[in-house]
Image (cartoon, rainbow, N blue to C red):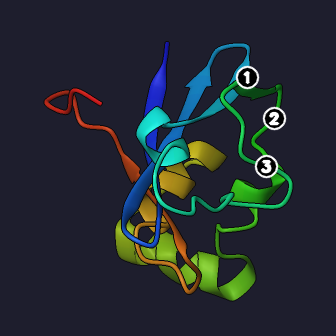
Amino acid sequence: MRQRAKVMYRDQLAGYLEKYDEGYRFTYENEYLSGNNPRPVSLTLPLSEYAYTSRVLFSFFDGLIPEGWLLNIARQEWHLKGTDRFELLITLCRDTIGAVTVFPVEEADHG
């Protein structure tokens, strides 16, 4: 089963993060790479036309998820019971302190 998320950098679509049974893949969007002065979403994910893959959620994205008491409050507010890091990411990281935000790709989206 595949789940997909849009990764935005300062409100611009930077790429897609995908979760598969065997792990994760992050790919920069071609338009983003060829745009004016593209920036990497993280120093650990430099700009590349090739996909990054990992068996576990990339540490940069995992680091966007709240921790400790803040995560507990978020779980209560959003009625989240599971511990799936990807689900936490796409639910809780739509409005972050930094330049990167993550949104679930809805079935109606064609991106």
Question: Disc number at residue 50?
Answer: none
**Which residue in the protein does label 3 denote?**
46
Secondary structure state at the residue bearing disc 3: loop
Q: Which residue is mark 1?
A: 23
Find out whether the residues at labels 2 and 3 contact each other: C-beta distance under 8 Å.
Answer: no
Place of residue 41 in the rendered image (x, y in percent of width and height, measured from the top left): 66, 59
Name the N-terminal-most of marks 2 and 3. 3
Give the residue displayed 78% in from the left and 45% down from the top: 58
The x and y percentages for residue 29 are 48, 37
**Looking at numbered disc 2 in the image, what kind of residue is underneath it?**
Val
Q: Which residue is mark 2?
A: 56
Kind of residue at badge 3: Pro
Nearest to N terminus: mark 3 or mark 1:
1
Up-down relation of residue 4 to residue 65 (above or below): above
Q: Secondary structure at mark 1?
A: strand
Asked if labels 1 and 2 touch by Cβ distance under 8 angstroms, the answer is yes
